[in-house]
Amino acid sequence: MTESEKPMAAFILSLVGGAFMLLGGGMRSMMGAYGYGSMMNGYWGYGMMGAYPGGVSPGFGMMRWYGLGGFGFTGVLFGLLVIIGSVMLYNKPADHSKWALVILIFSVLSLFGSAMGGFGIGLVLGIIGGILGLTWKSPTQAELKIREPD
């Protein structure tokens, strides 16, 4: 299959969007692990999790999961799934609807997981790439023969 028979625009936009989501989730995960600026840990470590410096306390439950960068982890996970979806969209263009839907779903879900969907840029690029993947049509053999010089 040649490059003209693959959804290149959808692949590139989704791949870049997934990279931004991965970066945003990684940064959020690192910041949450040290207790910087999260409301559950308190800004100076005297929040709901206890009076330990930096908010690092032996707490359990969802608040501790959040403090350890749990929401950042979901951002990393969603970014990886968007990247996998974009690679599969490129490698298996016959299943473009299925992979574009994966890209679209996890791009929207990244809004809740990472740093605002990969700083907002990843969210927008992922949604545009997913829509382009859904609307992409495979060129017919007649169209390919017209494009290629003899």
Image: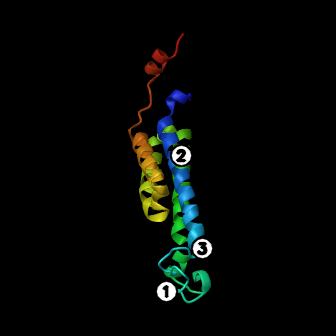
The secondary structure type at the circle numbered 2 is helix
Q: Position of residue 6 (x, y in %)?
A: 51, 33
Q: Residue furthest bottom?
A: 51
Are the residues flagged by discs 3 and 2 in contact, CB closer than 8 Å?
Answer: no
Say which label, 1 or 2, has the lower sequence index. Answer: 2
Query: Considering depth in this image, is 36 or 8 the residue closer to the camera?
Result: 36
Q: Position of residue 101 (x, y in %)?
A: 42, 49
* In this picture, residue 111 sits left or right of residue 30: left
The secondary structure type at the circle numbered 1 is loop
Identified by mark 1, the residue type is Met
Say which label, 3 or 1, has the lower sequence index. Answer: 3
The secondary structure type at the circle numbered 3 is helix
In the picture of the structure, the residue carrying the numbered disc 2 is 15
In the picture of the structure, the residue carrying the numbered disc 3 is 33
Instruction: Say which residue appears at 51% left-offset and 41% top-offset.
Output: 11
Query: Considering depth in this image, is 44 or 144 the residue closer to the camera?
Result: 44
Instruction: Say which residue appears at 57% left-offset and 63% top-offset.
Output: 27
Q: Residue furthest top?
A: 150
**Cα distance between the residues tagged 1 and 2:** 38 Å
**Cα distance between the residues tagged 3 and 1:** 15 Å
Label 3 vs label 2, nearer the camera: 3
Identified by mark 3, the residue type is Ala
Identified by mark 2, the residue type is Leu
- Whether residue 93 is visible here, answered yes or no, is yes
* In this picture, residue 131 sits left or right of residue 15: left
Check disc 3: other Cα within 10 Å, few if <14, some if 14-19, many if 20+.
many
Q: Position of residue 102 (x, y in %)?
A: 46, 52
Q: Indicate the colouring scheme.
A: rainbow
Assign the N terminus to one quadrant of the image: top right
Are the residues flagged by discs 3 and 1 in contact, CB closer than 8 Å?
Answer: no
Check disc 2: other Cα within 10 Å, few if <14, some if 14-19, many if 20+.
many
